Amino acid sequence: MHNEEIVLDEIKTANIRLFVKREDLIHPFVSGNKFRKLKFNIAEAKKLQKKTLLTFGGAFSNHIAATAYAGFENGLKTIGVIRGEELADKWMENPTLSFAEKHGMQFYFETRANYRQKHTGAYLEKLKDRFGDFFLVPEGGTNKLAVRGCEEILDFNEYHFDYVCTAVGTGGTISGLINCSQPRQQVLGFPALKGDFLPAEIRKFASNDNWKLIMDYHFGGYAKVNLELIEFINEFKEKTNIPLDPIYTGKMMFGILDLIKNGYFKKGSQILAIHTGGLQGISGMNERLKLKNLPIIK
Ligand SMILES: *Cc1c(COP(=O)(O)O)cnc(C)c1O
């Protein structure tokens, strides 16, 4: 995917150049990084002659949408174990879940208590009894094969960037970026949640130390937003024509521009921000914003 320079006064004044890698354009509905994370998992499922992918996610999960679509494209059945049994009779009103269903995903709605058990052996046995054999993709899609897929994000004509920035959820994407970065590059992660577990998770997969998590821009936690963030996303799109999602890329870009204003980056630095996608989540978020009488994302 191509890189686009962000030209804004505050970036120019700081003597920085900022580019965005448009991984969001990989697919109109499937998050760029989720596509990368599924690639080698699907290859492995096929190699093992599995017919079904099973995975987990919440009601607005980019990963659920991506898994449904990838299964559809590859002739694999998909099963989504969805957090929240109350969704069983109203998933049709949810844009993420109706997209997934349209692409063949079968749902299994689970209580929050049971959902927390999802990666235990006993719970997986129960799922095997119910659905038969399947290839398991973890929640958020992060495993070794997913990290390998994300190692394909950077290529050699991006080795001159001083910083590579990404949003962080489970840590798979940043791990892949770390592994394919150059030692002189710094990889900065912007967690979309209060992720105390993240450094340990990243160390499981990453083979270099040239990374850092910037913990100051999660806006209160996963899927939490405020007026300032929504206004930022709308203004950014107006000025640059690049849409950002409220859960991941909006928070990352807010953080990058804030750090630029605060003089965090050395003058003359070149930054590459990965647009990991997530745009399918906007319509679901807008429904929540309307209920809270907040402006919507345009
Ligand atoms: C899932 C997701 C992330 C986080 O990726 P991880 O590999 O879980 O850290 C970032 N951006 C978008 C748009 C996502 O959907």
Image (cartoon, rainbow, N blue to C red):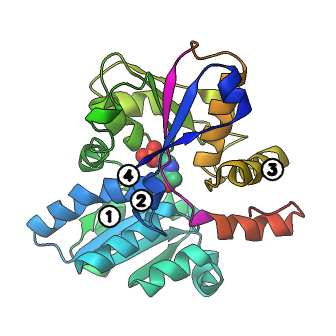
Disc 1 on helix, strand or loop? helix
Disc 3 on helix, strand or loop? helix
Q: Which of the marked residues, 4 or 1, is nearer the chain's N terminus?
A: 4
Q: How far apart are labels 4 and 1 at the CA level?
A: 37 Å
Q: Is residue 272 magenta?
A: yes
Q: Which of the marked residues, 1 or 3, is nearer the chain's N terminus?
A: 1
Residue annotated with mark 1:
124
Q: Amino acid at mark 2?
A: Lys
Cβ–Cβ under 8 Å for marks 1 and 2: yes
Q: How far apart are labels 1 and 2 at the CA level?
A: 7 Å
Q: Which of the marked residues, 3 or 4, is nearer the chain's N terminus?
A: 4
Cβ–Cβ under 8 Å for marks 3 and 2: no
User: Alpha-carbon neighbours of circle 3 within 10 Å: few (<14), some, or many (≥20)?
Assistant: some
Estimate the x, y position of residue 216 in percent, counting from the top left: 67, 29
Residue 131 against residue 227 in the figure, above or below: below
Instruction: Quadrant for residue 118, please give it.
Output: bottom left
Residue annotated with mark 4:
1
Kindly tell me whether residue 140 is visible in this rendering: no
Instruction: Quadrant for residue 194, please give it.
Output: top right
Disc 4 on helix, strand or loop? loop
Q: Is residue 141 magenta?
A: no
Disc 2 on helix, strand or loop? loop
Q: Which of the marked residues, 3 or 2, is nearer the chain's N terminus?
A: 2
Q: Nearer the viewer, residue 75 or 141?
A: 75
Cβ–Cβ under 8 Å for marks 3 and 4: no
Q: Which of the marked residues, 2 or 4, is nearer the chain's N terminus?
A: 4
Estimate the x, y position of residue 104 in percent, counting from the top left: 38, 85
- Image: magenta residue range: 268-281
Residue annotated with mark 3:
231
